[in-house]
Image (tube, rainbow, N blue to C red):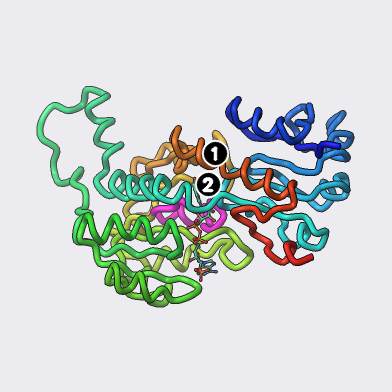
Amino acid sequence: MKKNIMVMGRLSASQEAELAQHFTLLEHSGSLDLAQPGVPEVLSKAHGIIGSSLPVTPELLDAAPELEVISTVSVGYDSIPVDELTKRGIMLCNTPDVLTETTADIGFALIMAAGRRMIELAEVVKQGKWQSGIGPDLYANDVHGKTLGMVGFGRIGAAIARRGALGFGMPILYSNASPKPELEKELSAKRCELETLLAESDYVCITVPLTQETEKLIGKREFSLMKPSAVFVNIARGKVVDEAALIDALKNNTIRAAGLDVFEQEPLPASSPLPHMHNVVALPHIASATHETRQAMAQRAVDNIRLALQGERPINVVNETVLNE
Ligand SMILES: NC(=O)C1=CN([C@@H]2O[C@H](COP(=O)(O)OP(=O)(O)OC[C@H]3O[C@@H](n4cnc5c(N)ncnc54)[C@H](OP(=O)(O)O)[C@@H]3O)[C@@H](O)[C@H]2O)C=CC1
Ligand SMILES: O=CC(=O)O
C-alpha cells in the first residue's frame, strides 16, 4: 500500500506529481489545528508531512501515530520540537545550502539599505520633497571599509561576510559557538567575544538559529554596548532579539538604524512601531523568496521526504540518531 503525505506548503504541479507517483497525497483543509474538523482524521493517516513554518506540538505528534518524517521547506526548524520527534523515531529533514546565497543577498541588501538610508531617502523623492540637495541631517554612513560583526558564522553568516570582506573591504569580526579557522584564513576574520564584537562593529548582523541559548541573545545590555552609529541587521529569527529593547534603542539613538527581515511575531502586528520608524528597513521575512531559490528549497524537501519514506537516506537529516534505529 502507498504511504500517505500531507502537503502543507506550496509545491509546483510537477513536484506534487512526482510525489503522487509514489505516495497518496491526503486531501486536507490546510490546517494543523487539532480543534479544526477533519484535522485529527487526516493526521492519523499521515506517514509524512511537508511544508514550512509547521506549528508542530507533542499533541499533534500524538495524533499522528503513523508519522515517519517531517520535511520542512526551510533551513530553520525552531517551530518543531526536535527532541519529541527523535523520542518517537520521527525523522526531521530541512533544506540548508540551496538558500544560502539568496538569503545572504538580502542580508547584505539590508546592510546597504539601512546603512545608506536608501528607503528613507527614496521616500523623500517619492513624496516630492526633493527640492534641493540634502544636508548632513540626511547623510548616511559608509559601508565599504567599515567593520562587520557577524553573530553566527555558519553557512549564511559566512556568505554575508564574504560579500562584505571581498566586495566591500570590510574587516570581519565574528562570534560563533565553534571557531572557523578556514574562514578566518579566507576572509581574515577574527573570532571574539560577543561583547567585543558589539563594541567594535559598525554593522552587527545576526545569523544564529533560534534555540533556547539564543532566545533574546540581543537585549538592552547588548544594544547599550554598540556604537551610537551602529546599524543592526537581523535575518535569522525575531526572537533572537528582545524586540522592545530594539525599539527603545532605535528611538533613543542608542544605535542608528536597523534592517530587519524577521520579527518576534510574524506577520508583524499592525500595532508595531517598527515599520513606521524612519531608521528601520523592514521586510516581510523574504530573504529566501526568489523563484529560483523557493523552487530549489521545495525540490530539496520533496527529495528528502521521498527518500525517507522509501527507506533511503535523505539528503538533509536534522536528527541523525533516528537513522540508526
Ligand atoms: N530570513 C530568512 O528568510 C532566513 C532565515 N534563516 C535563519 O538563519 C539561520 C542560520 O542558517 P544557516 O547559516 O544555514 O545555519 P548554520 O547552522 O550554517 O549557521 C548557524 C551558526 O550559528 C552558530 N550558533 C548556533 N548556536 C549558537 C550560539 N548559541 N552561540 C553562537 N553561535 C551559535 C552555529 O555554530 P557552529 O558552527 O559551531 O554549530 C553556526 O555556525 C537559520 O537557522 C534560520 O533561522 C535562514 C534562511 C532564510
Ligand atoms: O526562514 C527561513 C528558513 O529557511 O529558515
Horizontal side of residue 227 vs 176, given as left or right:
left
Does the residue at mark 2 contact the one at mark 1 (Cβ under 8 Å)?
yes
Relative to 157, is 136 on the left or the right?
Answer: left
Q: How would you rate the neighbour count of disc 1 (Cα within 10 Å): few for under 14, some for 14-19, many for 20 or more? A: some
Residue pushed farthest left?
133
Range drawn in magenta: 233-249
Residue named by callout 2: 263
Mark 2 and mark 1 lie on one chain; the one further toward the N terminus is 2
In reply to whether residue 88 is colored magenta, the answer given is no
- Dot 2 amino acid type: Phe
Q: Position of residue 153 (x, y in %)?
A: 43, 65
Q: Residue at x 64, y 57 (%)?
A: 317
Q: Which residue is mark 1?
A: 268
Q: Nearer the viewer, residue 31 or 96?
A: 96
Let me know if residue 236 is in the magenta part: yes
Q: Residue at x 13, y 41 (%)?
A: 135
